[in-house]
Amino acid sequence: MSKTKVELFAPGDNRDLYSGLIRLHVLHHAAEEPIFGQGMVEELARHGYRISPGTLYPLLHGLEKRGLLRSSEVQNGKSRRKVYRATATGRKALLAAKGKVRELFQELIEGR
Ligand SMILES: [Zn+2]
């Protein structure tokens, strides 16, 4: 297990249950528009996920390493900001995951 995973899945919390949902959520937004770390922290907080930049950044790097996201630097006022977009591979993975989420939703929520 990597160091990041140990920090992500501290004993006694259930965040490991949500880690896939968080990744899908990130992928979904990155497929719609370029995302950046702090914006995504706020978006996830809006949905009730408290995730620190220290947890989100390794997650973004991991998705990029796997070819699902691609980062680029854009000028933001005086500073430069790293933004991420979904790659074609990322969009394909998202589409495949949607089918699985739909099926899980039907079973969990709709009981069928
Ligand atoms: Zn969202």
Image (cartoon, helix red, strand yellow):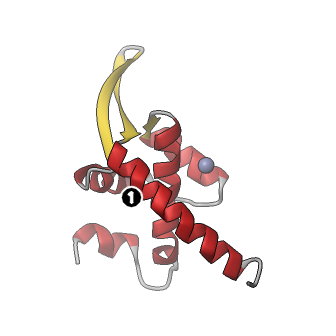
> Which residue in the protein does label 1 denote?
55
Q: Residue furthest top?
A: 78
Q: How many marks?
A: 1
Mark 1 residue crowding within 10 angstroms, few (<14) / some (14–19) / many (20+): some
| Point 67% across, 73% down: residue | 105
| Point 43% across, 42% down: residue | 37
Instruction: Assign a secondary structure to mark 1.
Output: helix
Q: Where in the figure is residue 61, as x and y percent of width and height?
A: 28, 51
Q: Is mark 1 within 8 Å of ligand 1?
A: no
Q: Where in the figure is residue 102, as x and y percent of width and height?
A: 62, 68
Which one is nearer the viewer's eye here, 36 or 78? 36
Q: Amino acid at mark 1?
A: Thr
- Using the image, determine if residue 15 lies above or below residue 26: below
Q: Quadrant of the N terminus?
A: bottom left
- Using the image, determine if residue 96 lies above or below residue 82: below
| Point 30% across, 27% down: residue | 73
Which one is nearer the viewer's eye here, 22 or 13? 22
Question: On the image, which quarter does residue 87 sit in?
Answer: top left
Q: Where in the figure is residue 110, as x and y percent of width and height?
A: 77, 78
On the picture, is 44 further left or further right than 89?
right
Q: Where in the figure is residue 60, as x and y percent of width and height?
A: 35, 50
Which one is nearer the viewer's eye here, 25 or 38? 25
Q: Quadrant of the C terminus?
A: bottom right
- Using the image, determine if residue 111 lies above or below residue 67: below
On the picture, is 41 further left or further right than 55?
right
- Using the image, determine if residue 108 lies above or below residue 76: below
| Point 37% across, 38% down: residue | 84
